[in-house]
Image (cartoon, rainbow, N blue to C red):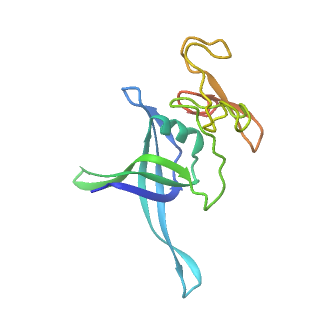
């Protein structure tokens, strides 16, 4: 039996990022999925029941969630469904959780601008290279700087900082390559 599930819905909370005691990056958010149907009698769309899920992402996905997904956006989540139940004060509670494999914006509701990361645990800098140029993140043979040294002369193996350019405002912000989060964002 497969527990894999695909859910379309809206992000109901801010992304919560953390790290496990073993050093694995995690990110989670609440997802609301509301059923809608067209009522021919009134000629209007009617909201149905809302199902609530806690979506959990790990490693590279966690870093990408932190800098890509915001509260209120429409997303599509693919992952493994887990149902939990517990008892507290004589009452039984239930929770539906999704261990996400993939999360993406639902383009039925808007447009998105995708930026491919160079490799596991790193984030490419916006505007580095032209499309099709090596290292531009287009899959045409570009590679990330190695730990033995890069163009800035770093050779300690520590991740370098990248920048993100907000297309709406044109402002440049630093991105932590390890987590994929914006450095100026509030924790």
Q: Identify the residue at the far left of this view.
A: 90
Residue located at (62% from left, 61% from top): 109
| Quarter occupied by the C terminus | top right
Q: In this view, does 30 lie above or below 139?
A: below
Q: In this view, does 40 lie to the left or right of 59?
A: right
Give coordinates of residue 43: x percent, y percent: 59, 84
| Displayed quadrant of residue 5 | bottom left
Give coordinates of residue 173: x percent, y percent: 69, 31
Q: Identify the residue at the far right of this view.
A: 170
Choose between 3 and 179: the one closer to the eye.
Answer: 3
| Displayed quadrant of residue 23 | top left
Residue located at (59% from left, 39% from top): 67
Give coordinates of residue 172: x percent, y percent: 73, 32
Choose between 51 and 111: the one closer to the eye.
Answer: 111
Residue located at (65% from left, 27% from top): 162
Q: In this view, does 37 lie above or below 61?
A: below
Choose between 178 and 129: the one closer to the eye.
Answer: 129
Choose between 73 and 127: the one closer to the eye.
Answer: 127
| Displayed quadrant of residue 130 | top right
Give coordinates of residue 96: x percent, y percent: 35, 54
Residue located at (70% from left, 37% from top): 132
């Amino acid at each position: 039996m497969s527990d894999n599930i695909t859910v379309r819905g809206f992000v109901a909370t801010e992304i919560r990022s953390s790290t496990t005691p073993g050093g694995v990056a995690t990110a989670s958010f609440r997802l609301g999925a509301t059923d809608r149907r067209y009522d021919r009698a009134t000629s209007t769309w009617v909201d149905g029941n809302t199902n609530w899920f806690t979506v959990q992402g790990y490693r590279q996905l966690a870093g990408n969630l932190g800098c890509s997904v915001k509260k209120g956006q429409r997303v599509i989540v693919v992952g493994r469904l887990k149902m939990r139940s517990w008892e507290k004060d004589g009452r039984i509670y239930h929770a539906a959780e999704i261990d996400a494999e993939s999360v993406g914006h639902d383009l039925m509701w808007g447009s998105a601008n995708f930026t491919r990361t160079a490799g596991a645990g790193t984030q490419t800098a916006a505007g580095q290279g032209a499309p099709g140029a090596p290292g531009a993140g287009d899959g045409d043979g570009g590679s990330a700087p190695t730990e033995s040294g890069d163009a800035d002369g770093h050779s300690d193996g520590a991740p370098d900082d990248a920048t993100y350019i907000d297309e709406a405002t044109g402002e440049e912000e630093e991105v932590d390559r390890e987590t994929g989060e914006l450095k100026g964002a509030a924790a």
